[in-house]
Image: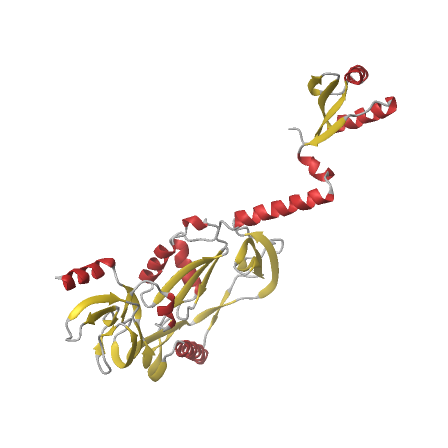
Amino acid sequence: MKYHFCKILVYKADFYRIASECSNLILRNVKTNHDKISFEINQPDYLQLDDYMKKEHLPVLERKDFGFFRFFTMHKMEILLTAVFLTLMILFINSLYIWKISVLGNYSYTEEQILSYVKTIHYVEGMKKSNVDCETLEEKIRSKYPNISWVSCEMKGTNLLIHLKENYIAEISTLETKPFHLLSNVSGTVVSIVTRNGTPLVKAGDQVKKGDMLVSGAVEVVDESGQGLFYTYTTADADIFMKVKHSYKDSIDKERLKLNYEHKNSYYFPTMKSYVWKYDFMKNKYYENSEIKLKLFGNFYLPLSIQKTTVYQEQPKKVAVSKKEAENLLNNKMLYYFATLEQKGYKILEKNVRIKESEKKYQLSGSFISIEPVGKISYIPAEEMTERKETTTQ
């Protein structure tokens, strides 16, 4: 492979002198053009040739450099333009892939839960944008997590954003373009309903089961006599609050793991290869890893991240958990759970829970009653709209 070679143009007479006096040099692609001859020579050989020609006062009519290492002999402006071009090419290639998947709007479900499921259906960092089907991903998440009221996926830069709403809110109707019904995502008693779009099918005091339709996105248009003319379809929009009874259950083992903290390290590594570098000179046996994605700007993430590894010198040890300690832990977890519900608009009216002890666990269980916003969107299929249109025509 010719990494760096030169193309030289000299007079014919001078070429014969060079060929005679410098027979140890390799001259390639010799071409005659009237009284001139051009040839190619490797850069190391050209240095020797250049010394000979200067000594004999032989003129070089033209010289051109070729090969990869010509980059190091270019002018500053050429280097700058080349660097800019290569940077733009790298950014363009990176922009064709997803390097970050973000979950927004989740309360009950952790980001790790959602991302873990998304990974099982082959939506992973490093996949091509052209292979991402947002509608299919939305449908799969709604099927997997029926308590999620609304899901919307979009790509910004190299970031795949998964928007979740665990309760119906008014903003959803402004974000959606497809008409939908509002269904109940729980069973309970309707406390209040204020409808903005659609046809309400329930009223305060009604008993509702999970999956029942609360507000229909089909609105019948009638004439002055009340005779139905046709149906229009909209995004059903309403504030609906219901009184609901929920069960609560949580537990903690009578033994917990205790870790002896040793030290931390941070590394840069390309996530596309999933490299994890570790120091094993201390013969550590336990690691915890986390990472921070690197980005250029906004949602333009790069296939690089900072890997943080927490190293533990010894294996985790099991220690006993007292009943009082378990009670405090379980109560704190329950209070955090109720605080999360309150952020979603719940009002806790009553709770009835107690702690029980089994052979291996402490368990906190019972029930609580809340007034909460309800509603889950259900897109209106084209078949339903066609069927209503035909029925109205008949």
Quadrant of the snapshot with the N terminus: top right
Identify whether 245 is placed above or below 282.
below
Taking depth in this image into account, of 252 and 180 the one nearest to the observer is 180
- The answer to whether any part of residue 385 appears in the image is yes
User: Residue 194 at x, y = what percent?
Assistant: 30, 79
Quadrant of the snapshot with the C terminus: bottom left
Taking depth in this image into account, of 176 and 98 the one nearest to the observer is 176
Task: Report the number of discs.
Answer: 0
- The answer to whether any part of residue 277 appears in the image is no
From the viewer's perspective, is 158 left or right of 172? right
Q: How is the image coloured?
A: secondary structure
Taking depth in this image into account, of 311 and 220 the one nearest to the observer is 220
Q: Quadrant of residue 222?
A: bottom left
Identify the residue shown where x is 53% and y is 49%.
94
- Direction front: furthest residue: 224
User: Residue 273 at x, y = what percent?
Assistant: 52, 48
Taking depth in this image into account, of 279 and 15 the one nearest to the observer is 15
User: Residue 278 at x, y = what percent?
Assistant: 59, 54
- Direction bottom: furthest residue: 349
Identify the residue shown where x is 49% and y is 49%.
96
User: Residue 11 at x, y = what percent?
Assistant: 78, 19
- Direction left: furthest residue: 394
